[in-house]
């Protein structure tokens, strides 16, 4: 493979020579320590959020700030990193496209981040605009612009802590790159990280004491990377949302004192912060290391919302309180798994009518809240549909559709079942005896057009859509966007009348 020109660019030596201008302690200690703190895939979770399994609120930048401060008080020699996907996940993103996240990272004292796929959700220009006032660099050594063959962000940065010189490089994997929507990567080229990393490490290794690779790659790619690029001492990873209690050592014969590369991820959504403490001897070999993950729970809750965030929250509240329609009756979600319910049917109807398909499918579990009779505010729709669910439309043959209906019917009153539009079915006891599509019996050989949240289509409700053809995903328009548009056009909502289930 031909390496892109930038790998040899004189910038590297330039950056290296600059690093020698940094002050060095007159007398280096025999042993030096370094504390790394890191997050990944924080996905716009600025405020604490309810964690279903832990039955408490976790995460939030205020708690993270408190924790970082407490670590810095006892050990000022810290390096704080983020492995990407800072953007996308809550209404704060839909409204501010990442601005408060970068501001928060400034306040928290982050030293570097790498680019995740979701950081490009509104394009490279949006990311560049949001990080232009960042107090830390975005690092990515393997994405270039086609127009000029230059890297979109700098490939690495050298830090100095306690007299230690530490290089941090940034990489994104092909897996993550493929998750970037096509229009957002137009004009950009992805390059295989491994040969680039090998080349960078060869140049950096003689000049620094420690090399960290900051990865938005997914855990599956970190180990092969560690084996192929043995000069990397630590990999701080993300993208796969992997929750690790401790760092994992991949042996690769490195002379760095531990004979390999330590890999660690810190879960996602900022519920954990990862921490690695290292001790190096006079030959800059790692003699001790310990790692842990620290839960961002109420322990760290000692401070009100910072002023910076409060001003965003105020604007957000005003936007969320806008009235867009009226519910003519209550849409309850009590007992939603028992069978068709008005809000589930309505959402399936909106999917079907927005994408003009024969059938609309909504997952019952995706309806997160009900709607009370009266005015409808924007924020209520965000509570019903908090996720950034894109929508798929595809074709399904009658026999495949029957399987979907039967699987869903077998889970009534349990969980993981579906709400349908354009289709009704008859149950005798627990058996599906008849399925009709728009009043006509289901034709097992016919192909029907179907719309459903991508989450459901991908099998996340344990219902398979295998065999579907002509699959297309809506580009950037979420189910919530469709519902908001629908209500703006049809502001008075009442319960759908068409039957979905006939119980005999
Ligand atoms: Zn990702």
Image: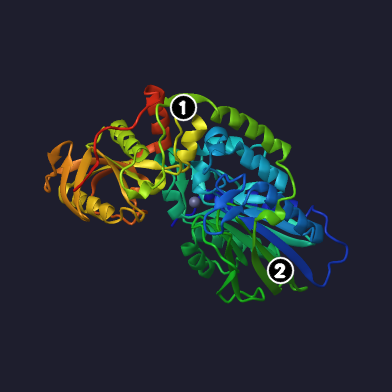
Q: Is residue 149 visible?
A: no
Q: For mark 2, what is the residue?
A: 278
Which of the two discs, 1 and 2, labels the residue nearer the N terminus? Answer: 2
Left or right: 387 in relation to 235 = left
The image's mark for residue 374 is 1
Badge 1 marks a residue whose secondary structure is strand
In front of the other: 438 or 227: 438
Query: In the rendered view, how is the structure colored?
Result: rainbow
Q: Quadrant location of the N terminus?
A: bottom left
Residue 451 image-quadrant placement: top left
Question: Dot 2: few (<14), some (14–19), or many (≥20) neighbours within 10 Å?
Answer: some
- Dot 2 beta carbon under 8 Å from ligand 1: no
317 or 260, nearer to the observer: 317
Residue 286 falls in image quadrant: bottom right
Visible residue check, residue 16: yes
Q: CA distance from mark 1 to mark 2?
A: 58 Å
Question: How many marks overall?
Answer: 2
**235 shown above or below 419:** below
Mark 1 nearby-residue class (10 Å; few <14, some 14–19, many ≥20): some
- The x, y position of residue 399, in whole percent, is 16, 51
Return the x and y of residue 79 as percentages of the image width and height.
71, 57
């Amino acid at each position: 493979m031909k390496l892109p020109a930038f790998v040899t660019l004189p910038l590297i030596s330039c950056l290296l020579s600059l690093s020698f201008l940094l002050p060095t302690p007159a007398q280096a200690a025999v042993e030096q320590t370094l504390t790394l703190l890191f997050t990944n895939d924080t996905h716009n979770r600025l405020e604490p959020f309810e964690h279903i399994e832990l039955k408490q609120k976790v995460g939030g930048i205020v708690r993270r700030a408190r924790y970082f401060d407490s670590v810095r008080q006892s050990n000022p020699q810290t390096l704080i990193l983020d492995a990407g996907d800072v953007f996308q996940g809550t209404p704060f993103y839909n409204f501010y496209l990442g601005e408060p996240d970068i501001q928060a990272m400034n306040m928290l004292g982050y030293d570097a981040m790498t680019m995740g796929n979701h950081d490009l959700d509104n394009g490279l220009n949006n990311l560049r605009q949001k990080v232009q006032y960042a107090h830390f660099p975005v690092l990515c050594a393997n994405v270039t612009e086609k127009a000029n063959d230059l890297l979109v962000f700098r490939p690495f940065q050298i830090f100095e802590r306690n007299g230690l010189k530490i290089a941090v490089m940034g990489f994104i994997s092909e897996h993550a790159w493929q998750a970037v929507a096509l229009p957002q990567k137009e004009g950009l080229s992805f390059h295989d990280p491994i040969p680039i990393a090998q080349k960078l490490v060869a140049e950096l290794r003689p000049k620094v004491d420690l090399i960290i690779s900051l990865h938005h790659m997914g855990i599956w790619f970190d180990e092969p990377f560690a084996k192929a690029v043995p000069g990397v001492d630590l990999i701080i990873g993300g993208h796969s949302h992997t929750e690790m209690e401790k760092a994992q050592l991949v042996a690769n014969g490195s002379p760095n004192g531990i004979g390999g590369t330590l890999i660690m991820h810190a879960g996602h959504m900022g519920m954990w912060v990862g921490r690695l403490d290292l001790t190096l001897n006079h030959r800059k070999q790692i003699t001790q290391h310990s790692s842990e993950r620290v839960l961002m729970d109420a322990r760290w809750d000692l401070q009100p919302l910072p002023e910076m965030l409060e001003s965003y929250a105020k604007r957000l509240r005003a936007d969320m309180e806008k009235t867009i329609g009226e519910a003519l009756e209550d849409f309850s979600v009590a007992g939603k798994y028992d069978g068709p319910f008005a809000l589930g049917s309505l959402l399936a109807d909106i999917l079907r009518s927005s994408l003009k398909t024969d059938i609309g499918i909504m997952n019952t579990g995706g309806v997160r809240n009900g709607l009370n009779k009266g005015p409808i505010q924007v924020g209520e729709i965000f509570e019903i549909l908090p996720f950034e669910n894109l929508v798929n439309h595809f074709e399904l043959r009658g026999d495949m559709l029957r399987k979907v209906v039967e699987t869903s019917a077998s889970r009534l009153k349990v969980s993981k079942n579906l709400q349908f539009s354009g289709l009704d079915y008859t149950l005798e006891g627990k058996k599906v005896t008849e399925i009709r599509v728009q009043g006509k019996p289901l034709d097992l050989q016919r192909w029907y057009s179907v719309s459903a949240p991508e989450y459901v289509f991908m099998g996340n409700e344990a219902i398979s859509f295998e065999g579907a053809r002509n699959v297309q995903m809506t580009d950037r328009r979420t189910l919530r966007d469709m519902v908001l548009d629908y209500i703006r056009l049809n502001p008075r909502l009442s319960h759908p009348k068409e039957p979905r289930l006939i119980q005999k």
